[in-house]
Structure formats: C-alpha cells, structure tokens
Amino acid sequence: MTTTAAPTVLIVGAGPAGSTLAYWLAKRGYDVTVIDRTKRIISTINRIDIRGAALEVIRKMDLFDAVMQRSLHIARTEYVDANGFAIVTLNESAFGNEEGSDAELKRSDLVELLIERSNDAAQYIWDDTVTHLEQTNDSVHVTFAHRESRAFDIVIGADGIHSATRAMAFATSETDISRFLGCYVALYTVPNYLKLHNTQHMYNEPGATIGITATEKEEPALAMFAFASPRLEYDYHDQQAQKVLLRQRFTASRAWETQRLLELAEASDFFYFDGMTQITQPSLHNKRVALVGDAAYCPAPVSGQGTSMAIVGAYILADELSGANGNCEQAFTGYERRMERYIQKNHAIGVLSASSLVEKSKMSIRIRNVFIRRPLLVKSMYRKIQKQIKDASNSIDI
Ligand SMILES: Cc1cc2nc3c(=O)[nH]c(=O)nc-3n(C[C@H](O)[C@H](O)[C@H](O)COP(=O)(O)OP(=O)(O)OC[C@H]3O[C@@H](n4cnc5c(N)ncnc54)[C@H](O)[C@@H]3O)c2cc1C
C-alpha cells in the first residue's frame, strides 16, 4: 500500500487568522508550519471583539466557554468636557448590547487560546520571517530570514494589515489595494491613575477623540487617541516615530487629561498605532499563495469586525482546501466566492465606525451632547447600529 505525504502549508503570522487556520488545516490532514516575527505572544490589555459566525467557529473549536470566561465588559461610558466634568454617563444597557451575542476579550488571551488549541498539531516558529517567495507549478520556494529555505505546497499570508506576504506574492503596494478612511488611532497602556473600574472616559474636541478605559482598578488602563488626518507617511515598525507623530498632533491641546496621557505614552509597555484603513485586495490568491484575515480584507482597525473576519475567513479557507482534493486554485476561488458578501457587509461597518470615531466641529460636538442626554434616542440609535453589526457578522454560512 502506498501512502501519500500530507500537503505542506506555511502560514505567515500567528494572529487570530493564522492560528485559527493552523487548527483547521491540521485537523484536515495538512502538515502545518506557522511562522511569526515576534518572539511569542506578549500579554496586552487591548481588546478585540468576536461576533456572529466567528463565535460559531469558536464553538466548533470547543473554545466557547474559555472565551466567555475571559470576556470583559465596559459597564459605563462617561463623556467628559475639557475640564473633566461629566457631560453624561451611559450604562451598558444604553447601547442596546445583547448579552451572549458577542465576546470582548484581550487580544493576547484570544491568541493564546487559539495557539494552545493548535500547538500539538502544527509547528510554530517564532522570531523569524519570510524574505522571498518563488512559485513554480507545484510548490512555493520560501526563503527565511534566519533558517534554511524550504519548499511548501501552499503559502498563506496571515500577517496582518501591512502584510509582507501580500507585497511579495502580489507585487502591489499597500496604497493601491487599500481605502484610507480619514483618521488614525493610537492605543497604549497607562497606569490606571483615575482608578477606573469597568469604565471609559471620553473627551471630544473638533477632529479628535481622546479616551481612557480600564476594566480593573489594579490593572493598567488603555489610553486612546483618535484624530482626523490625511494619509501620513511613517514607518509601521517604528513605534518611537509614531509616538513623536502623536505628540506633535496634540502638542497644542491643553484640555482634560490630554497632556498627561501623552507624557505616559513614552513609558507604555504596549503601543498600537494605525490608520483606519480597509484592505480592498481585488483577488485573495495568486497561484499557490493566498491571503486571510487583515492581510486580505481588513475592515479597518477599531471597527470591531477584524478579528471575527479573520476567524471566519480562516475557517472557510480550510473548508475549501479540504474539499478541493489538492487543487488549491479551485479551493482559493471557492474561498473568495464564499467570502464576497461577508467582506462587503463588514467593510460597510468599518466605514460606519470610522465616520463616528471623531466629531468634525464644535457644532457637531454640541449636537452630539444634546443627543446623548436623551436615553431613548440613544438606545434606539444603538439598537439600529447593533442590528447592522449583527447582520454583517452573520452574513455567511459556516
Ligand atoms: C500586536 C497587535 C496589537 C493589535 N491591537 C489592536 C487593537 O488594539 N485594536 C484593533 O482594532 N486591532 C488591533 N490589532 C489588529 C487586530 O488584532 C486584527 O485586526 C485582527 O485580530 C485580525 O487578525 P489577523 O490575524 O488577520 O492579523 P493580526 O492580528 O494583525 O496578526 C498578524 C500576525 O502576523 C505577524 N506578522 C506580521 N508581519 C509579519 C511578517 N512579516 N512575518 C511574520 N509574521 C508577521 C504579527 O506578529 C501577528 O502575530 C492588533 C494587531 C497586533 C499584531
């Protein structure tokens, strides 16, 4: 009896997309290697959401209870003025959230769970990356930064919004395949000096929103700066340059806690900065290389949909690959077709969240302040938004 070797796959990126894909492809008989440029997951307090079909995938991975146990929730949002006085405090119920229909947890907790689930069946390589890809008719020859090159049957880019795999396999620049939604977001850890507990404070000035959120009094808090801007030129890998950029943007702002929060950016142990950008890659595959998650169809950071899309996309891609009997191009085409409507609907949520991230003028802030003092109006508006999010999150068959 002859045995055929398992098809080999290299997944670049061990985030939510890469680790979910590793689990499902290993389960379906693939020989899976995952490579990530970081040393290993570092515990951070920034949160991501999982909703709709993505929660169904989490359930199928037997991770639902573990995810729910780690779920966090922000019970109160306090809108403050330039002197820090509360304009209004809204409780969770004001936003029309439905309990159990979504999960919000630390990104690092989720990634840890997903990697643990696939660790026995897939090989994880840390602290390395891919520097070159060369496709032949029946394999992809991969050159690594720190180990010997190797051929794989297929390669999947799960390396996030600024995907290097995408740049290597599609020879396109990020500007060509992205839609910038007009603002930037910085998120970073600060000491919880306001002693917040399951609470966020939000301050608006024209063109910017500044916030601080904490779940536990003893844990660090998360500072947020969002600001409207044209596209900026900066190095994605250079956090120091991003901190300078942030400081320069807010140097004149003396309101509320702005200057104190800016000073604390220097010492933060976690710092995230990115543009509200959607990835609109026209085709998700090129011969034996395909893209999944933010690398393929990021709906925009802070849209709240990126992680769900990454998990769902990974599941659908593995499903198509397992049914295509080694014909990866057929599988990739099926994956693209099944994802099309889901991507479209979730990109619409990305646009919606980008448009509500900052208020444009003093007048629009005044109008917003009148509006948020009317609980029934607030609830009715958030119910409508929740419905649209729920619809987008469930707009695919698992
Ligand atoms: C450290 C980090 C913090 C984040 N924080 C937030 C946040 O606070 N708010 C928010 O909205 N979104 C955040 N995101 C993005 C969010 O997690 C994603 O939108 C979402 O989870 C989609 O997941 P993904 O797996 O497609 O991509 P990502 O979560 O971006 O994961 C990509 C993975 O690929 C790895 N990688 C990247 N480039 C390479 C390379 N060249 N070679 C090898 N490995 C590579 C990264 O280390 C990462 O592990 C963050 C992403 C990261 C990496």
Image (tube, rainbow, N blue to C red):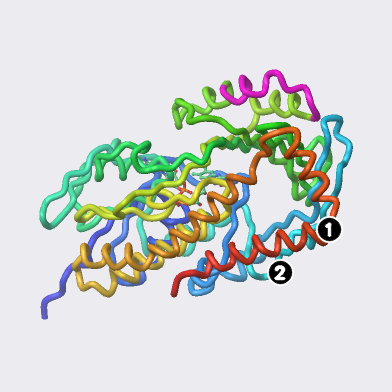
Rendered position, 15 above or below 272: below
Range drawn in magenta: 245-256
Which residue is painted at 39% across and 64% down in the image? 339
Q: Which residue was labeled with disc 1?
A: 375
Q: Find numbered disc 1 in the image and state the secondary structure of the residue it sits on.
A: helix
User: The C terminus appears in which quarter of the rendering?
Assistant: bottom left
Q: What secondary structure is marked by label 2?
A: loop
Q: Position of residue 7 (x, y in %)?
A: 22, 64
Q: Is residue 148 left or right of residue 234?
A: left
Q: Position of residue 20 (x, y in %)?
A: 44, 61
Name the amino acid, label 2.
Glu
Who's the residue at 44% across and 74% down the image? Answer: 397
Q: Nearer the viewer, residue 321 or 306?
A: 306
Reply above or below: 346 against 232.
below
Q: Neighbour class for label 2 at 10 Å: few (<14), some, many (≥20)?
A: few
Residue 178: name its quadrant. Answer: top left
- CA–CA distance in space, label 1 to label 2: 19 Å
* Residue 186 against residue 71 in the figure, above or below: above
- Give the residue type at disc 1: Pro
Q: Residue at x 58, y 51 (%)?
A: 352
Given the current orientation, which residue lies at the most extreme bottom position?
1
